[in-house]
Image (cartoon, helix red, strand yellow):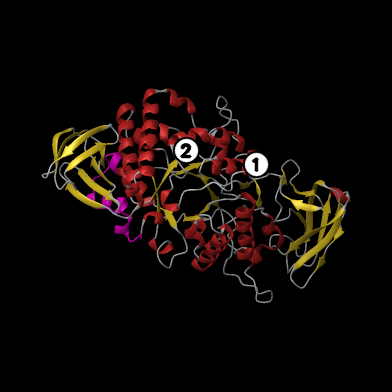
Amino acid sequence: MAAPIEFNLFAPYIKGAALIGDFSNWKDIPMQKGEDGYFRTQVELEDGDYQYKFRVQSKSWFFEPDQWVEVIDPYAVDIDNPTQNGVVRIKDGERIVDTYVWQHDDKPLPADRELVIYELHVGDFSGGEDDPYARGKYKHVVEKLDYLCELGINAIELMPVKEYPGDHSWGYNPRHFFATESSYGPTEGLKRLIDECHARGIRVIMDGIYNHSEAESPLTQIDHDYWYHHAPRDPDNNWGPEFNYELYDEKLETYPARRFIGDNIRFWIQEYHTDGIRFDAARQIANYDFMHWIVQEAKKTASMKPFYTVAEHIPETTSITNADGPMDGCWHDSFYHCVLEHICGDTFDLERLKDVIDCKRQGFMGTVNVVNYLTNHDHNHLMVELGDREIFDAEAFKRIKLGVAILMTAIGVPLVWMGEEFGEYKPKTPDSAKIDWKLLGNDLNRVLFEYYKGMIALRKQNHALYTENIDFFHENPEAKVLAYTRWNDEGSRIVVITNFSENFLGGYHVSNFPAAGKWHEWTGDYDVESGEDGLMLDIGGYEAKVFVWQQ
């Protein structure tokens, strides 16, 4: 039985709009404009899938005045890629996205301070391992979840999955904000991926692009300057039309761009059960008032479940996360640069090292305020950086382990970029660059994976690493040795000793050791006794020792 289905379009200052679709043989169905700025019409539709678009008299400055143009519904939840039409699905007389039934909403998920995040690109992470050009899909990520569980991560950060032009992109050019990228599979595929993550205690953080859109995104075609700035504010950092979060419509008492993005974020949390957002290009958004509001909307929509908000603000700033800041955390790019330069032997600066290991020295308040990483999608893998300095093979793997020890024991939330855990070596590229899973068959690569696995396990098991407690108790600039301890009030304690020189230090005396007694060296799996005068140990060049207090 057919039911009346409403189609509406918010476009308060254009003169006319019509609905077209396969249900009308693509002939105009007039839409009536209300005082609230919406054009509306109803169509009697049976259950099923239908393709449709709007025809509008555009107010965008790059068209002729009031020129009629065809646009996809800005709120379309699915796009038919071959025809570039919106898709509406009707079931039992109602609009739906799909018929997926969630199975694991009741599973407990880790708190923000407990997170170990794994960033991945759906298209390049998996799928067709023997074909470097095959596009990975949501279902292929599901097939790798047991691998990620073995690694030990408890959060996945998906690079953008909103519909973009073509079949390959990093996703930072979203065209359709309510639709998922069709080349990755159907909407049910993304829901199943998130549901299966939740079943395993893994949170899913979405990479959100709210600074800009792709040039032919529907709102740009309808009335560009109602939603966007007329021209780039910073031409050197422009990736598409920039949302204008300052523009206020006094007549309708609304901020148009905020309204659209607010609707979008609420939709993704409600429909896809997401657990956090990374806000891309937060420095370019440059509007804390908007960011405060949108984070509050997101957390209110997420209700009682944990929801982590992270800003990509390069360079990082404490203002975005501290008491009056809008975000929970921000990407800690100074950590990346400092640790990279030190494990590559480019420099040695104890004060810089201490600043990035203890973000409080930079003015941050605590653990969830920074996301630390040795690399991410914006940077080369460490193996590439080391190779560029002619550091290869066992020496390169050894230095990466030093970085991992710091990553997993520093104050902050650690993030791993896909493939780094087993020594992926491909240079950064916006083109397709599927990670090479065959590397896990090599001894050095597998040992590195096991090292990551072990350090992630320590991170999750030893709650001293969830605190803001840290003390740099031993510093030796001449030997390039730095040691620090982390602890909590319940008696957990670890000690990290790092050697940033090429020299093997035999019988090295670590003074001021936090406590005399029995310690377990985590990475080598052996016990030592420290005395009142400290600890004597052997430590290799570019090596870290990690000791856990045995109570």
Q: Nearer the viewer, residue 317 or 190?
A: 190
**Disc 2 packing (10 Å; few <14; some 14–19; many ≥20):** many
Q: Is residue 372 visible?
A: yes
Q: Is residue 309 left or right of residue 93?
A: left
SS for dot 1: loop
* Residue 495 position within the rendered picture, expressed as x and y whole percent measured from the top left: 25, 44
SS for dot 2: loop
Q: Tell which tag, 1 or 2, sits nearer the viewer.
A: 2
Magenta span of residues: 342-365
* Residue 143 position within the rendered picture, expressed as x and y whole percent measured from the top left: 57, 32
Q: Which amino acid does the dot numbered 1 rest on? A: Gly
Does 346 lie within the magenta span?
yes
Q: Which amino acid does the dot numbered 2 rest on? A: Met
Does 366 lie within the magenta span?
no
Q: Nearer the viewer, residue 14 or 270?
A: 270
Q: Is residue 269 left or right of residue 87?
A: left
Q: Which residue is mark 2?
A: 418
Q: Which residue is mark 1?
A: 166
Q: Are marks 1 and 2 in contact (CB under 8 Å)?
A: no
Q: Nearer the viewer, residue 197 or 209?
A: 197
Q: Residue furthest front?
A: 551
Q: Which mark is residue 460?
A: none
* Residue 376 position within the rendered picture, expressed as x and y whole percent measured from the top left: 44, 43
Q: Residue at x 50, y 54 (%)?
A: 306
